[in-house]
């Protein structure tokens, strides 16, 4: 579990749109261990979006945060680091890696109670991604599965929080990495 303080300014950098939809749902559910008003400029930033990176580097990181910590949460399924200029490193706590390995759609596998079935299918096809597995279960394309409408509809029927908890129980924890469960209340 990550300890947040009321004075912290939180920067969430996410990998893809599915992560964004899930993070937005968690914000709406007031599920984080920090308050939504603590989000820097009340927004999140996409890791691969040049405009977002420029905003962080040119607008936000140079700001004076006084005695407040600037906590950067990097929510993604891979090990890519967020390139932060050394000139700003002293004022930033993190980036704190919040991993969603093997990919964020693994939460859907847990929601459906299909973890063992997925592991069995993956033993036959080592390249099988959770999104492909779940798309097959629903008979949809992976792009449809990752759409905002599908993700929102899915988590209206299934508990996102329960899926996050189950994932944290099953996934292999690596040093200096956290799970979504570690940033929830």
Image (cartoon, rainbow, N blue to C red):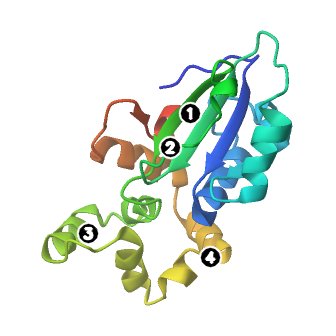
Check whether the beta carbons of the residues at disc 4 and disc 1 lie within 8 A of each other: no
Q: Tell whether label 3 touches label 4 (CB within 8 Å).
A: no
Residue 18 percent location from the top left of the image: 59, 64
Q: Number of labelled discs?
A: 4
Name the N-terminal-most of marks 1 and 3.
1
Report which quarter residue 85 is drawn in.
top right
Residue labelled with disc 4: 147
Give residue 7's quadrant in the image.
Answer: top right
Q: How many angstroms separate mark 4 from mark 3 (CA)? A: 21 Å
The image position of residue 111, as x and y in percent, is: 42, 61
How busy is the neighbourhood of tag 1: few (under 14 within 10 Å), some, or many (20 plus)?
many
Do callouts 2 and 1 mark residues in contact (Cβ within 8 Å)? yes
Q: Which residue is mark 2?
A: 81
Q: Position of residue 60 (x, y in %)?
A: 82, 35
- Asked if residue 58 is positioned above or below residue 61 in the image, the reply reads below
Marks 2, 3: nearer the viewer: 2
The residues bearing labels 2 and 3 have C-alpha atoms spaced at a distance of 29 Å
Q: Earlier in the sequence, mark 2 or mark 4?
A: 2
- Label 3 sits on residue: 118
| Number of other residues with Cα within 10 Å of mark 2, as a class: few under 14, some 14 to 19, many 20 or more | few
- Neighbor class of circle 4 (other Cα within 10 Å; few <14, some 14-19, many 20+) is few
Q: Nearer the viewer, residue 85 or 118?
A: 85
Which of the marked residues, 4 or 1, is nearer the chain's N terminus? 1
Mark 1 vs mark 3: give the one in front: 1
């Amino acid at each position: 579990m990550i300890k947040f303080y009321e004075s912290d300014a939180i920067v969430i950098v996410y990998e893809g749109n599915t992560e964004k939809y899930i993070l937005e749902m968690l914000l709406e559910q007031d599920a984080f261990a920090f308050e939504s008003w603590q989000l820097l400029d009340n927004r999140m930033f996409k890791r691969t979006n040049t405009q977002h990176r420029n905003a962080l580097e040119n607008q936000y990181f140079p700001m004076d945060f006084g005695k407040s910590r600037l906590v950067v949460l990097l929510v993604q399924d891979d090990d890519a680091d967020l390139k932060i200029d050394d000139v700003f490193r002293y004022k930033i706590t993190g980036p704190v890696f919040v991993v969603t390995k093997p990919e964020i759609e693994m939460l859907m596998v847990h929601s459906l109670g299909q973890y063992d079935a997925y592991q069995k299918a993956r033993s036959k096809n080592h390249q099988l991604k959770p999104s492909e597995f779940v798309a097959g279960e629903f008979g949809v394309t992976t792009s449809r599965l990752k759409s905002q409408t599908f993700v929102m509809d899915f988590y209206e029927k299934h508990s996102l929080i329960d899926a996050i908890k189950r994932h944290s129980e099953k996934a292999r924890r690596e040093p200096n990495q956290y799970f979504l469960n570690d940033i929830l209340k």
